[in-house]
Image (cartoon, rainbow, N blue to C red):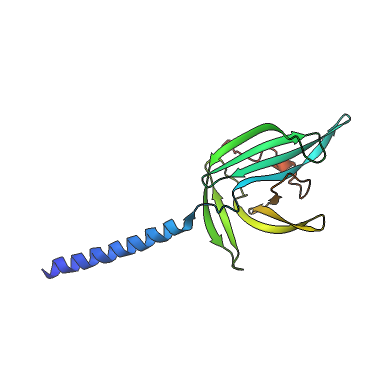
Amino acid sequence: MIMNMKQTLWLGTAGLVATFFTGSLVAQAKTLPKSYRGDWYGYVGSEKVGHVKTYYAIKLRLTSKRMDYNFLQTTQANLSQLKWQWGEKSLATYQRRTNKHHQTYYVLSSQAYQDDLDRLQLKTVKRNGKNTQALHWWGDADSVYAFRQPQRAYAWGWDFEDYIPTDE
């Protein structure tokens, strides 16, 4: 009788600890807030071939469970009439984190996308003297900004032309 009571007490305690632990893991696995979801554009750069200057951009589409990455180009300086070159779709999960300054950011995890850029945060940046909301996408070595509309600002550079996916 005493042994059964000890076993029951021990099993109950173990169950409580397991419930608490799995509950905290589930609490960390968040979906991406609506303010982060949607289309974001990053400016890669431009090149001149002959007499024609071509501009390149990245279009990110973030949803609660997926990330689409598309490489676009145009000959228009204002980045209108963007034409799709190639793209990749990937399932993604996001974890909510807070830095030491109590600012919230999200960690991106995806099987198709394995790279240093794995954190997302909404920031306000200056663009032509005006404050503009941007998606700050960063990791250990790199940091880039994407905007709701295509803009020739905060160029990502040519390293991002084929950044995603890793074919390893």
- Quadrant of the rendered image containing residue 75: top right
* 1 vs 80, nearest the viewer: 80
Q: Position of residue 17 (x, y in %)?
A: 33, 64
Extreme top residue here?
A: 50
* 4 vs 40, nearest the viewer: 40
Query: Where is the C terminus found, in terms of image quarters?
Result: top right
- Quadrant of the rendered image containing residue 112: top right
Extreme right residue here?
A: 51
Q: Is residue 87 left or right of residue 46?
A: left
Q: Position of residue 136 (x, y in %)?
A: 67, 54
Q: Is residue 31 left or right of residue 126?
A: left
Extreme bottom residue here?
A: 2
Q: Position of residue 61 (x, y in %)?
A: 61, 43
Query: Where is the N terminus found, in terms of image quarters?
Result: bottom left
Q: Residue at x 56, y 45 (%)?
A: 63
Q: Is residue 102 left or right of residue 151?
A: left
Q: Residue at x 75, y 38 (%)?
A: 56
Up-down relation of residue 60 to residue 8 (above or below):
above
Q: How many marks?
A: 0
Extreme left residue here?
A: 1
